[in-house]
């Protein structure tokens, strides 16, 4: 019904105050249009579900305040939603993957591996130590001035990297795998971005161009960055699979990996993860691209799953508060570190 992507593209990324203003300006219109399109009245709703954590505080505030007004007006129960739980379960709307399953959530704000044991029951195996893969791809795209490139000027940073990578040769640019000696399931992307920045500075000097102009090797850099991100995600996911097998955390017949979040729409990353899952006897599931990025449908679906399970259905929401930072489930990462599992080499022929 509505997207703020175009405006965020113009501002070079998501600026909290801008996002809040856009939320305030459009939330009532979008909700009304959704209700009108559904063919039912607000009085016929069973409950109202809203994201309350984690996320940008200013945006969460707008959504929660508006929802509380609707709840008071129509006397409906409230279902608070954890943003990452919603991403993890979106795939079940179209493909009923049974619990438990392994989930990889990769977006502009998050990167984590967890076991989904139930609608609101997660074991966290690892998460990013610094920034998320989508954030890294966006920052690299910004540093490469891809908004000035005719082939991808209307795309988000991650989309632009994926587009140009298809025309590049990753072997022409040497990048080191992040935290390769750490035998856990955590992620790190800031070191990779620093590597790329140094390469860009060096290439700009060699070509005699200034920041804002397009390097002749831009496609090669995009290909190398995309491959390094994909390989890092694949290796950590591979270790998570080995850990789950060792500890018996997933069913022996038909174990599954679910991949979600905005970065999950990247085809190259999907292929890298498919190589890992096929080598380990796992099925691979992900939502269609339009449901990978943040969307209202996944919040509604999570509300339905919670309602069916009788979880977090609140009839007196007076004490509900939004939480900009919130962990996902029970932190199991120390057990993963203690296992110190080595991952066998797996060639990513993509």
Image (cartoon, rainbow, N blue to C red):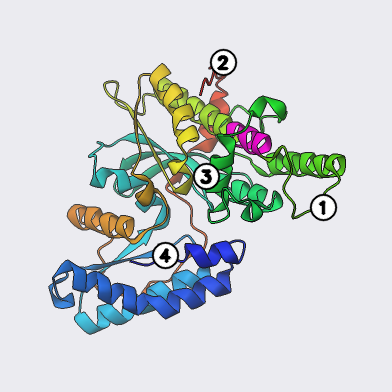
Pick whichever, 94 or 56, lies toward us: 94
Q: Residue 345: give its label.
A: 2
- Label 3 to label 1: alpha-carbon separation: 33 Å
Location of residue 44 with respect to 348 vertically, above or below: below
Q: Which range is magenta?
A: 219-228
Query: Which comes before the other along the chain, label 4 or label 1?
Result: 4
> Looking at the image, is mark 4 or mark 1 nearer the viewer?
1
Res 274 quadrant in image: top left
The residue sitting at the bottom extreme is: 73
Q: Check disc 1 and report its element: helix, strand or loop.
A: loop
Give residue 67's position: percent from left, percent from top. Answer: 33, 75
Which residue in the protein does label 1 denote? 210
Residue at 54%, 17% in the rendered image: 347
> Is 305 left, or right, of 285 in this rendering?
left
Query: Which comes before the other along the chain, label 4 or label 3?
Result: 4
Which residue in the protein does label 3 denote? 111
């Amino acid at each position: 019904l509505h997207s703020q992507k175009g405006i965020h593209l113009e501002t070079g990324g998501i600026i909290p105050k801008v996002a809040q203003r856009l939320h305030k300006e459009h939330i009532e219109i979008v909700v009304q249009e959704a209700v009108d399109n559904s063919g039912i009245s607000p009085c016929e709703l069973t409950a109202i579900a809203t994201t309350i954590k984690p996320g940008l505080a200013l945006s969460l505030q707008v959504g929660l305040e508006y929802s509380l007004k609707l709840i008071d007006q129509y006397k409906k129960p409230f279902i608070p939603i954890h943003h990452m739980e919603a991403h993890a379960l979106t795939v079940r709307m179209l493909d009923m993957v049974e619990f438990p399953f392994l989930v990889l959530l990769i977006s502009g704000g998050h990167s984590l591996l967890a076991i989904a044991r139930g609608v609101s029951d997660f074991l966290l195996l690892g998460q990013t130590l610094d920034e998320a893969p989508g954030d890294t791809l966006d920052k690299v795209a910004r540093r490469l001035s891809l908004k000035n490139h005719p082939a991808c000027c209307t795309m988000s940073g991650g989309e632009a990297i994926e587009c140009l990578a298809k025309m590049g040769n990753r072997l022409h640019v040497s990048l080191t795998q992040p935290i390769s000696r750490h035998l856990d399931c955590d992620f790190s992307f800031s070191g990779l971005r620093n590597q790329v920045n140094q390469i860009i500075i060096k290439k700009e000097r060699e070509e005699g161009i200034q920041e804002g102009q397009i390097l002749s090797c831009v496609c090669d850099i995009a290909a190398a960055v995309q491959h390094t991100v994909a390989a890092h995600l694949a290796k950590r996911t591979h270790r998570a699979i080995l850990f789950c097998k060792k500890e018996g955390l997933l069913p022996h017949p038909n174990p599954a990996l679910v991949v979600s979040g905005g970065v999950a729409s990247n085809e190259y990353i999907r292929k890298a993860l498919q190589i890992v899952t096929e080598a380990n006897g796992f099925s691979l599931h992900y939502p269609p691209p339009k449901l990978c990025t943040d969307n209202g449908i996944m919040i509604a679906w999570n509300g339905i799953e919670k309602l069916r399970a009788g979880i977090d259905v609140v009839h007196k929401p007076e004490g509900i508060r939004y939480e900009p930072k919130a962990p996902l489930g029970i932190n199991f990462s120390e057990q993963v570190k203690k296992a110190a599992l080595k991952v066998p080499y797996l060639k990513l022929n993509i």
